[in-house]
Structures are given as structure tokens and as C-alpha cells.
Amino acid sequence: MSTTTRKGAAQRHCNTHLARTMRSLSTDTVEDRSSALFPVGAGSLHSPATSSVEGLRMAQDFAHIPVLLDEVTALFSPVPAGVVVDVTLGGAGHAAALVASRSDLGLLGIDRDPAALEVARLRLAEFGDRAVVHQGRFSEIRDIVSDSMEGRSPWPVIPGISGPAPVVGILADLGVSSPQLDWSERGFSFSKNGPLDMRMDPTHGETASEFLESVDLEDLTEILRENGEGRYARRIARALLAAVPLTTTDEVVAVVDSAVPRGDRRRGHVASRVFQALRIAVNSENIELETLLDSVLDLLAPGGRVAVISYHSGEDALVKHTLRRWAEGDCTCPPAMPCVCGSVSLGTLVGRRSVRASESECERNPRARSARLRCFEANR
Ligand SMILES: C[S@@+](CC[C@H](N)C(=O)[O-])C[C@H]1O[C@@H](n2cnc3c(N)ncnc32)[C@H](O)[C@@H]1O
């Protein structure tokens, strides 16, 4: 299996305050301590420059519970032979199941987190050249795919297909993984003290600590309001800015506690939403998803499918409306009337409703409870 590291484009990060204050995609889910996507063993944080021995230990330490695994595999079972791009590779739970399910599928896995890639690379090694991993942001998917298809970086090799195989699937399993929350050194968790970082790619970009030093009161209030904490957004924003520099997660929790009236100060409740809002801002998650959705249809071969798992109502609403718009071809005719506006459908919704996890899956993996899976099949 090949590994590539994206340089130029990966270093153009779009963490502008404008991007951070755009309409929220994610407002109702907070840090889920029961998350079990990657239950961590005894190991601690592994730096991005992990050695292969450490990497092996990471992979062995991690039990892995990908959400809606059977449902995702089933959704990709009718696609033509070709490459599935998993843009949120994580520990490669979905990715490994997909390549194992069909010998005529290859896999390009993308993740911005070098530590996740380290685990994924080991898990996918058994598939040889059929699986390729790539560090980068999924908003860069067009460049990543074209670089690979044009030979500037590796593209999965599928036995029996000569030349670059077409893209027949795109999977996005949004949000953070459990190790990102569990490793205190990453600074994502309000319940574990660590450096105030929160970057999914800890090798570049502004940390949450630096972000708090550069943002102004209006923007921070808006970010908290739109991405997590509505009620006390302004008072918390004011308290945070009065307290900078803030360098640890415990300091943020203490400031948030001090800004919230005693009666509403249930330990962790408000802090978890503030952490979620900061994480979304630091990683430009809203603009990442919008850019991804703007890019994917141009990449898919006819009959190819895109599937997205979201964990927040805001994200799911964007996915739902985008897929519906593709299916309706931006039709402007009244719903009860035949279409006369000349719009052309780009494909078909696969199922009218989102797919939800079964009760038994939710019992095994509580993180699955908020998951919603939506899928679209391209017709051209
Ligand atoms: C929920 S986990 C995915 C787990 C994966 N499906 C599995 O089975 O192991 C989400 C992953 O997406 C990555 N991620 C989130 N936003 C990203 C982005 N904009 N670009 C690339 N990777 C991203 C995170 O670093 C994390 O590893």
C-alpha cells in the first residue's frame, strides 16, 4: 500500500474568521463520552511522527466499531467496479470492510489526522495496491483525486482494470473519532486536561489556544451561538477573551463555569457545547463539508454513489437538502405541478429517509444513536 503526504494544497488552510462564523451545521450534539468508535487501550498519545513499532501498537490497542457498517457496505454493493474514496478514513473500519466486500473495488482513504492514517495504513496493508491512503482535508478532494489519477501520487490498482479505475463511491463519516476525544494531548475533551489544541491535523494550523487570542468578541459570540452554546454565548465569549492566553482545556472549563449562573452550571454540560463550537471553528468543519458536497458529483462515474453519515442535525440538514437538490435538478416548479422549468436531475436519492442504527447497534455502540446515513446515486 502506498502513502502520500499532500504538501502545497494541504498547507493552504481556510481558517478565516468568516468561514468560522458562517451558518452553523452543528448545533445539538455535544461530546459523547460513551463514544466507542476507537476504544483506546492502555496507550497514550502517539505523535504524528509515530514509528512503525508504535504504529503497530496503536493499531493493536484500538478496538474499532465503525457506525452502520453493514448498511454502508450494502449501499456500495451495486456500484460498478472502481475506486471508493473514503474521505474520513479514521481507523479504516468502513474502508477495510468495503475493500474486503468486493475484489473489484479499490480504495483511496483520506484523513487530515496523521495518527489516524498510521492506524489505517496498517489495517489496509493486507489489500496491497488496492488501497492507498493520503493525508489531507476532504475539501481538497478534487485535487487529491486528479493528482492521483494523473499519476502524480498513487491511485489504487484493481486487478483486471487497466488505466486509472473510475471513482464509483465516496464515503464521509463526519465528526471526530474516539481517540481524538480520548487522547488528552489532543485537547478535544472538556473532561480530560490537556493542551488547548483541538486540531484534527496537529501538524499545522491555528490551535484553539491561538484561535482564542486572535478572534474578536462578536465573532466568538457568533461561533458559540451557532455551533453549540446559544444561551450564554456572549457572557462566555467575554469571559474567555478576558482570560486569554488560555493554554489548557481545564482553564477553559473553569472560565466557562465562572461565566454561567450557578443554577445552570451542571458540570460539563455547557463546557461540552463550548468545546464542540471551538472544535468546529478550529477545524473549519462547516466550510469543509460545504466544499466537499460541492465537489463530489463531478468526480463520480455514472452509477456511482455518495454516502454521508452525520451526527448533528445541522450537518444532516445540509446533506439532506443538498442530495434532494441534486435529485430534483434545482427544479423551481411548485411541488404538485409537472416540471416545466427544464431542470435536469443529476441522479436518484437512495431511500427517501435517512438510515438509522438499529437498537442493538446503539446498545453496542452508543455513538450510533445520533448517526444518520444518506445516500445518492449519480446518473451521469
Ligand atoms: C468518525 S471518524 C471516521 C471513522 C471511520 N469511518 C472508521 O471506520 O474508522 C472521522 C474522521 O474524519 C477525519 N476528518 C474530519 N474532518 C475531516 C476533513 N475535513 N478532512 C479530512 N479528514 C477529516 C477525522 O480526523 C477522523 O479521523
Image (cartoon, rainbow, N blue to C red):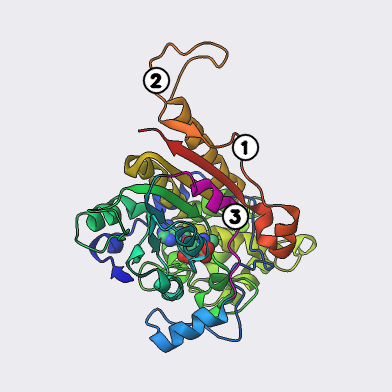
Name the amino acid type tagged 1: Arg
Q: Are marks 1 and 3 in contact (CB under 8 Å)?
A: no
Residue occupying the far bottom of the picture: 53
Which residue type does callout 2 highlight? Ser
- Residue at left 47%, top 71%? 209
Q: Is residue 356 magenta?
A: no
Q: Amino acid at mark 3?
A: Asp
The residue tagged 1 is 353
Q: Is residue 224 above or below residue 306?
A: below
Q: Is residue 27 left or right of residue 359?
A: left
Residue 129 coordinates in the image, percent (x, y): 32, 67
Q: Which mark is residue 343?
A: 2
Residue at 50% in and 75% down: 186
Q: Which residue is mark 3?
A: 70
Residue 215, can we see it? no
Q: Is residue 298 left or right of residue 46?
A: left
Residue 315 placement (x, y as % from top left): 54, 47
Q: Earlier in the sequence, mark 2 or mark 3?
A: 3
Q: Is residue 218 visible?
A: yes
| Closest to the observer, 48 or 281 | 48
Give above or below for 52 relative to 288: below
Question: Hey, which residue is sitting farthest front in the picture?
Answer: 160
Secondary structure state at the residue bearing disc 1: loop
In-front residue for pair 192/238: 192
- The mark lying in front, picked from 2 and 3, is 3
User: What range is drawn magenta here?
Assistant: 63-79
Sequence-earlier tag: 1 or 3: 3
Q: Position of residue 303 (x, y in %)?
A: 41, 38
Q: Position of residue 11 (x, y in %)?
A: 28, 64
Of circles 1 and 3, which is in front?
3
Residue at mark 2 to residue at mark 3: CA–CA distance: 35 Å
Q: Which mark is residue 92?
A: none
